[in-house]
Image (spheres, grey):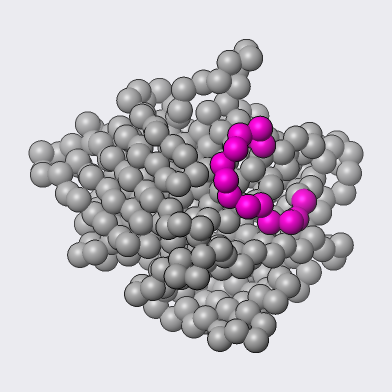
């Protein structure tokens, strides 16, 4: 998994954010974890490091959510992508604590890094303002997450991914989709970021970037100039049409179980905010047309999907926000 932290190189006058994160989902139950290690830096100020932990259980309603922001110094290197206080995340291990939650996890990557943006210049230049990657879009986990006096979660055999993004500004509106553990397609996965930005005072059409992997073949989806992205979204789920390379097409449908979504506040370096709805135990169905003459395949998982919707706070979405500020 090729990845490195960007925050150590940020100048004092720069504003930026960065996030390394993992999501893991149980094979037989609608139970999942979403853990983030983040850096937030306003121009002219010192960077702050935060740990976020969300535990989903669709059988019990609302998720466990907690966040801590630490004054301890942040670091990167020495085998870790990021260290915040005593918490660490690297290619093979994730450790940390956040409120009642404490985790010690092993990570086994099962897929090479996915760089969602197709041009290397897009990661080096000023635009786009958000730069997403997945050090591995397919990870097998081991270890435990402890939640106070509740039974510990044992993640041996859980599936998921590790993600990384950074930038100077979040998209005006975005969707992140991830899917894994599909019935009958053990090695298949989906990982796509979709966004709209404001240019000249107007909101652009949706632009998608990512890939689907089916039977060992990785198919690029979206791209800066690829037309045909169609999106219908709400806090309860979405239906997305994603054009791909070589005439490929994916139709993705994700549904959020009732009351299972988490609501968070994300701050930009300029002080503005987005509200984010995330469900990491969403039901997911894909119709994958590879574009190589082979038949369309339907993939489904009862709870192996991630559906994340980011939006401005003026929009009513009905999901309760965790009582933690950002930035």
Q: Residue 57 location in percent, x, y? A: 49, 69
Residue 151 vs 22, above or below: the answer is below
At a point 73% along the width and 72% down the height, the residue shown is: 99
At a point 60% along the width and 31% down the height, the residue shown is: 172
Horizontal arrangement in the rendering, residue 259 relative to residue 257 (left or right): right
Q: Residue 232 location in percent, x, y? A: 39, 34
Q: Closest to the observer: 236 or 308? A: 236
Q: Which quadrant holds residue 59?
A: bottom left
At a point 40% along the width and 23% down the height, the residue shown is: 225
Q: Closest to the observer: 145 or 278? A: 278
Q: Which quadrant holds residue 250?
A: top left
At a point 66% along the width and 52% down the height, the residue shown is: 321
Q: Residue 322 location in percent, x, y? A: 68, 56
Q: Which quadrant holds residue 34?
A: bottom right
Residue 195 belongs to magenta span: no
Horizontal arrangement in the rendering, residue 283 relative to residue 96 (left or right): left
Residue 323 belongs to magenta span: yes
Instruction: Count all numbered tags in the image, as a single digit.
Output: 0
Magenta stretch? 312-325
Residue 295 vs 75, above or below: the answer is above
Q: Residue furthest top?
A: 200
Q: Is the magenta stretch mostly helix, strand or loop?
A: loop
* Residue 163 visible (yes or no): no
């Amino acid at each position: 998994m090729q990845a490195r932290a960007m925050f150590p190189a940020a100048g004092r006058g720069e504003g930026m954010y960065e996030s390394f994160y993992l999501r893991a989902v149980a094979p037989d139950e609608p139970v999942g974890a979403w853990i983030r290690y983040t850096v937030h830096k306003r121009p002219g100020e010192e960077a702050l490091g935060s740990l976020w932990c969300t535990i989903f259980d669709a059988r019990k309603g609302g998720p466990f959510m907690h966040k801590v922001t630490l004054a301890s110094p942040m670091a990167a290197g020495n085998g870790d992508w990021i260290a915040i206080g005593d918490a660490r995340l690297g290619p093979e291990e994730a450790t940390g604590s956040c409120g009642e939650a404490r985790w010690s996890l092993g990570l086994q990557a099962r897929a090479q890094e996915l760089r969602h943006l197709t041009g290397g210049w897009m990661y080096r230049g000023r635009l786009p303002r958000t730069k997403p990657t997945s050090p591995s879009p397919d990870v097998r986990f081991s270890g435990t997450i402890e939640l106070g006096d509740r039974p510990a979660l044992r993640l041996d055999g859980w599936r998921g991914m590790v993600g990384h993004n950074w930038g100077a500004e979040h998209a005006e509106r975005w969707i992140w989709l991830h899917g894994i553990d599909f019935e009958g397609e053990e090695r298949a996965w989906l990982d796509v970021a979709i966004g709209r930005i404001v240019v000249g005072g107007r909101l652009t059409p949706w632009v998608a970037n990512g890939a689907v992997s089916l039977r060992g073949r990785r198919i690029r989806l979206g791209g800066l100039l690829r037309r045909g992205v169609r999106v219908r979204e709400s806090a309860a789920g979405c239906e997305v049409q994603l054009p791909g390379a070589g005439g490929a097409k994916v139709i993705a449908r994700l549904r959020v179980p009732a009351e299972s979504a988490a609501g968070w506040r994300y701050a930009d370096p300029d002080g503005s905010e987005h509200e984010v709805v995330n469900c990491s135990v969403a039901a997911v169905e894909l119709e994958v047309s590879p574009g190589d003459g082979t038949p369309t395949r339907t993939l489904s998982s009862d709870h192996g999907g991630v559906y994340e919707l980011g939006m401005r706070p003026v929009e009513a979405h009905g999901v309760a926000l965790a009582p933690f500020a950002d930035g």
